[in-house]
Amino acid sequence: MFDKRKDTSPTSRIDRNPPPEPPRQPPAPAKPTPSTIGRTVTVEGTLTAQEDILLEGRFNGEVALMENALVVGETGDIRADIKAKNVTIHGKANGDIKATNQVEISASGSMRGDILSPRVILHDGAKFKGRIDMEPEGLDASAKPPKGADAAKSADSSSKSAKSAVAAEPSAATAKPAETRARA
């Protein structure tokens, strides 16, 4: 009457301990929200930061965000020379921009000034007046040519040495590539 029957069939066994769950990866850290300069704020001076900046107000001066981004919102108005990793303009900007990664001007953006960046995006409808230089050498201070008298001396001496090299070995200019490699 109170006998329990043992059922040994594999389908009737219930495992009360479910298999362990695989270890969960911690969520990727969310990109921090940029610091915002609000619509009613006007700032003059030098802005430096170790974080991204969203400008919705007005700024006059100089911006240095070397490893970070500056976004000029649709209500933003900036009159400054800007150095940043990325610059995005939805509002108005006057001044030169030096970006180590990218400059983007949206359809609502307006920019007057020169841009030095390896990547530049101008959306349809964007307004831009200035020059664009996308040469990566321009972003590295050590790659700049010497200024003033040193530049003239450097250019003069390099052209003289190039002329003397050709004059010293006139056959090198007409030599076959294999012969040139053998001499080098």
Image (cartoon, helix red, strand yellow):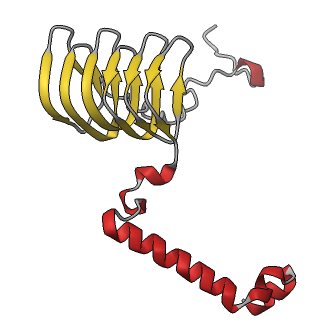
Do we see residue 54 in this rendering?
yes
Q: Residue at x 79, y 85 (%)?
A: 180
Q: Residue at x 18, y 25 (%)?
A: 60
Name the quadrant containing residue 163.
bottom right
Q: Nearer the viewer, residue 129 or 160?
A: 160
In the picture, the quarter occupied by the C terminus is: bottom right
Taking 95 as reference, is 59 left or right? left
Q: Residue 70 at x, y = what percent?
A: 33, 28
Q: Residue at x 57, y 13 (%)?
A: 124
Q: Residue at x 60, y 79 (%)?
A: 162
Taking 46 as reference, is 1 left or right? right
Q: Residue 81 at x, y = what percent?
A: 27, 34
Taking 75 as reference, is 60 left or right? left
Do we see residue 181 in this rendering?
no
In the rendered view, tell whether residue 124 sits above or below residue 60.
above
Name the quadrant containing residue 27.
top left
In the rendered view, tell whether residue 179 sits above or below residue 32.
below
In the picture, the quarter occupied by the N terminus is: top right
Taking 2 as reference, is 49 left or right? left
Q: Nearer the viewer, residue 182 or 175?
A: 175
Q: Residue 128 at x, y = what percent?
A: 45, 21
In the rendered view, tell whether residue 103 sits above or below residue 101.
above
Q: Residue 116 at x, y = what percent?
A: 43, 40
